[in-house]
Structure formats: C-alpha cells, structure tokens
Image (cartoon, rainbow, N blue to C red):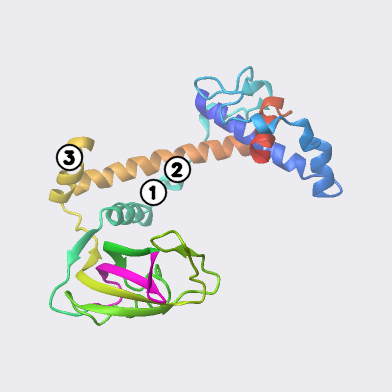
Amino acid sequence: MKHLRSAAALAAALALAISAAGCGASSSEATSSVLGPAANYDYQNFTYSQGLDANGHWEGVTALDYVTLPEDFASVSLRKSDVEPSEEDLQAQWDSLLDSYRINQPVTGRAAEEGDIANIDYSGTVDGVVFTGGTAEGYDLTLGSGTFIAGFEDQIIGHNVGDNFDVTVTFPDDYGDSTDEAGNTITLSGKEAVFNVTLNSLSVSVLPEATDAWVEENFGELNDLHTVDQVDQYFYDALYRSNLTNAIVDYLTEESKVSSIPDVVLNYQVNSQLS
C-alpha cells in the first residue's frame, strides 16, 4: 500500500492547496494572501525535477506527516462490478488500436470522391510567380479534410488518376507573405493563386480486420500476444487494474485528512504555473 498511500496523500494535498487558495472574500485576494506576490518565487529558474529525488519523490517530505489516512485504508471495500471494465470500455480499446493501424487501400476505376486520399503533385503561382511553400510532389491530401485553402480540395473531386489540371483559389485576407526564388516578398493575402495539379493516385483509409493472423503479425513477437482472445484479456486486465487503482486512490483521497501543505509541494506548483 506504500505507493497508494503516497499517491493519495499527494493528491489530497494538492486538492487542498487549490481549494485553500480560492477561499476568502475574493479569489484574487485569497490567492494573494495564501501564496504571496510572484516576486517571492524564483520561477525563472524553475525545473520540473526541482525538489524531487531520483525516484520522483519529494525530498525531505513524508506524506503521512501531513495526511491522516482512514482507519480502513488497508482493507478498502470495493465491489468487483464497480471496477470491472464494460463491453463498451473494451470496444473503445479495440477501436483505438485498430484506428492506429489504418491502412491505405488503392482506389481504381472511378474518379476522386470526398474522403479519398489523393496523392498529388502541385505547383502554385500568384500573378504568374512561383512562391515558396506552394510546390510539392507526392503529397497525400484527404479530400474534404479542409487542410488546404478553401476550394482547393473540391476542385480535385471528379478527376481521375493521371489527370493534370489547374486549381484556382483565393488566399484568405489574413494569410502571411511568402517569397519568390530570389527571396523577394510575395504577398498572398487576398490574392488569387493558380495551382497546376497532377493526380498521381487515389486511396481510402480503412481499418484492418481484427483476426488471429493480424494479431500474430503485429504483436506476436514483441508483446507475446497471438490471438484476438489474448488481446481481449490484455485489455480487460489493464482496464481492471487501472479502474481498481483509481477507485482506491479516489476513496483514500476523499476520506483522508490533510493537516497542512508542505512548502516544497506548494512552491513547486506556484513556480510551475508562473514559469
């Protein structure tokens, strides 16, 4: 229970520090009376390891000198149903995992549509002059993402792989300047630009299918996970441990009594915010 006690104590201490700073006639007056002026703090020289030892513990601070834990801290009563992950929780883990392993599937036999990934070469000019940042080769652009200037992506839709065409757009009024090849300033704000575009290929982003073979290929050697059922169990165990730890720490934080805040902890929080 050592680590849980330390975590609960620190969480409770920080919670009290924040609430204490907000008590009184007004938040600004109370904060000033509790914390003092910024000039009292050496925040210019603050580092995130300040006051911490090699293990990340506060130097010279014993949590239980400031925190009184509830009598039942060693045998907190929790129901399994309160910490057991739901089917929705497990599915969310799968959704996140599969989304991170999306693959691009080539598209053939049709024109570009919204949602496609268009691989393009493009070269833009303003008043006939090529400008820095307006040229690229082999760029993957998701049509409809709004990544490029308004109207650019719309003018790719309907074209086929291999087409070469011009896209005409107008830069927003607040758009920054660019330069030409000689380094001269090129004003882009509010200007019409013409981009010559070649559509190299089309693809769509799809989720992989969660099969035993897919699990083996991606996680067999490094993670010793070889089947979908094993990944399910991995997710279940990880979520269960996390939920259990959070439930215990939440209980201890609520039921613990904090007598005061160590100066090193309070100063650390103030300095980090000022920094």
The chief SS type of the magenta part is strand
Residue 261 x, y percent position in the rendering: 71, 29
Mark 2 / mark 1, whichever is N-terminal: 1
Q: Nearer the viewer, residue 201 or 249?
A: 201
| Secondary structure of the residue carrying numbered label 1 | loop
Residue 43 painted magenta = no
Q: Mark 3 and mark 2: span between their CA atoms?
A: 27 Å
Q: Is residue 237 above or below residue 179?
A: above
| Secondary structure of the residue carrying numbered label 3 | helix
Q: Name the residue tied to disc 2.
A: 243
Q: Name the residue tied to disc 3.
A: 220
Mark 3 / mark 2, whichever is N-terminal: 3
Residue 265 x, y percent position in the rendering: 66, 29
Mark 3 / mark 1, whichever is N-terminal: 1
Q: Of the residues shown, which amino acid type is indicated by label 3?
A: Gly
Q: Which residues are magenta?
A: 112-131
Going 22% across and 72% down the picture, which residue do you hit?
Answer: 199
Query: Do residues under tags 2 and 1 come within 8 Å of each other at their CB atoms?
Result: yes
Going 17% across and 40% down the picture, which residue do you hit?
Answer: 220
Q: Of the residues shown, which amino acid type is indicated by label 2?
A: Asn
Q: Name the residue tied to disc 1.
A: 85
Going 26% across and 67% down the picture, which residue do you hit?
Answer: 121
**Residue 120 occupies quadrant:** bottom left
